Image (tube, rainbow, N blue to C red):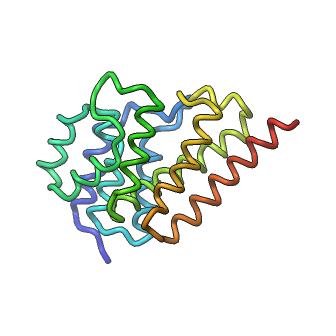
Amino acid sequence: MTFSDRIVEAFAFTHGLHQQQRRKGSEVPYLTHLMAVAALVGEYGGNESQVIGALLHDAVEDQGGQETLERIRAKFGDEVAGYVAGCSDADGEPKPPWEERKRRFLKSVTHAPSSVKLIVAADKLHNARSILKDFRELGDAVWQRFRGGREGSLWYYSEMVRALATGWSHPILLELSEAVDALQCAANAASNR
């Protein structure tokens, strides 16, 4: 499979939206996360529209809500817009309370098509790996970055593995499950010291 120039257009569009954004609690450019998620989707067999959806998966939540979704639809079509919408747990400000939003998103992911589940799984896999890396460097201070804190974050990632696995089997799920287990074990070991 080869990608068309739409990938270049999608990256430029993504860069325009997220160029000033940083990963939570760090100076790491947010674009690194979006590129990593897109790469995982491509490595796990996603098509061009899914890779573009992966690049843009946080655009609605972080960069303009429904207006941004309509810009994505106009530029990249209904399929990509559907992927982005399927990966978004909020589309306006203020966002609903954290737990309510996450529970609603988990329910949505449970029933999502496999094409959306692949992008969500890649997103959560990269996030889990990043949190584990930062946890190893910073310890429990890493949980202060997240509205759910330690308990809420660990709960959410465990529930996400279950939601994604409902009616869907894919090799990326094993990697996600292993990453979430490693994060849980590291957090538990630190708590037991």
Q: Residue furthest right?
A: 193
At 34% from the left and 33% from the top, the residue drawn is: 62
Tell me the quarter of the image containing the N terminus: bottom left
Horizontal side, residue 102 vs residue 148: left or right: left
Q: Nearer the viewer, residue 42 or 111?
A: 111
Tell me the quarter of the image containing the C terminus: top right
At 35% from the left and 42% from the top, the residue drawn is: 58
Residue 7 % position (x, y): 27, 59
Residue 92 % position (x, y): 27, 29
Horizontal side, residue 23 vs residue 151: left or right: left
Horizontal side, residue 34 vs residue 4: left or right: right
Q: Nearer the viewer, residue 66 or 19?
A: 66
At 69% from the left and 28% from the top, the residue drawn is: 141
Is residue 68 positioned above or below 176 on the image? above
Is residue 137 positioned above or below 97 on the image? below
At 53% from the left and 55% from the top, the residue drawn is: 161
- Quarter of the image for residue 15 reads top left
Horizontal side, residue 190 vs residue 140: left or right: right
Q: Nearer the viewer, residue 76 or 179?
A: 179
Residue 34 % position (x, y): 41, 48
- Quarter of the image for residue 136 reads top right
